[in-house]
Image: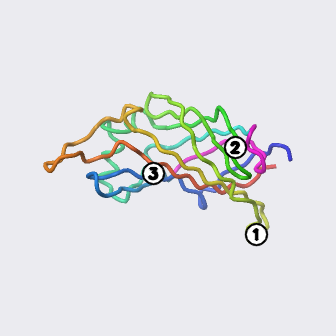
Amino acid sequence: MTKQVFKVDGAHSNLGFEVKHMMIAKVRGSFDTFTADLKLDPEDLTDAEIKFTIDVASIDSRNEDRDTHLRSEDFLDAEKYPQMTFVATDIKKTDDAEYDLTGDFTIRDVTKPVTFKVEYAGRGRNPWGAEVVAFEANTKINRKDFGLTWNSTLETGGVLVGEEIKIHVEIEANPLD
C-alpha cells in the first residue's frame, strides 16, 4: 500500500501523561487540543511522515489550580511557548505491528530526541462506513531534560513533583484521500 494522508479523530484520540506526586501517588492528565500531520502506510510505518503539534494551554489534570500552575512560567510557560511539537526522524519496525518511533520533541525552547514504542492496533470501519486506523504509543521523558525544573521540597523529605513523565498516546485517524 502507498502512503496516505490521515486526519486524527480528536473525539476518539487521547494524548495523556502521568507523573509522581509527593513521591507516592500519581497525577494523570491530558492535552485536549492537538493536531497531527500523518502521511503513512498503516501496515508499514517505516517511511511515515509524522508531526504532532500540542496546544499547551489545553492541559487538563482535573484540577484548575494545578493546570494554571502548569501553564505558568514555572512549568510549560504557555504564554511564551504555546505549542509543543514532535517531528519523526526515524522509524524502525521491531515486530509485526510494533515500531520504535524516534523524533525531535520540543517543549518550551528545548528540543531533544525521544523514542516512542508504537503499536499499530489495526483498521476498521466505523458505524457510518468510514475507514479508521488506530495506533497506541508510549514513552518516558525526564522533565528536567526540557528545562522543567520547578519543584518543592516536602517536610517529610522528597519532592512534590517527580522527574519522570510517562506519555501515552492513543490515535484513531481517518484517511483523507
Q: Magenta residues, as a range?
A: 33-47
Mark 1 crowd level (few <14, some 14–19, many ≥20, 10 Å Cα): few
Type of amino acid at the residue the image marks with label 3: Phe
Question: What is the C-alpha distance between the residues marked 1 and 2?
Answer: 22 Å
Q: Which mark is first along the chain, 3 or 1? A: 3
Looking at the image, which is closer to me, 71 or 49? 49
Residue at mark 2: 38
Mark 1 against mark 3, which lies toward the viewer? Answer: 3
Q: Residue at x 37, y 59 (%)?
A: 62
Q: Which mark is first along the chain, 2 or 1? A: 2
Q: Count the numbered circles shown.
A: 3
Mark 1 against mark 2, which lies toward the viewer? Answer: 2
Looking at the image, which is closer to me, 168 or 33? 168
Asked if residue 53 is among those painted magenta in the image, a careful observer would answer no
Residue 99 in the figure: left or right of residue 69: right
Residue at mark 1: 128
Mark 3 against mark 2, which lies toward the viewer? Answer: 3
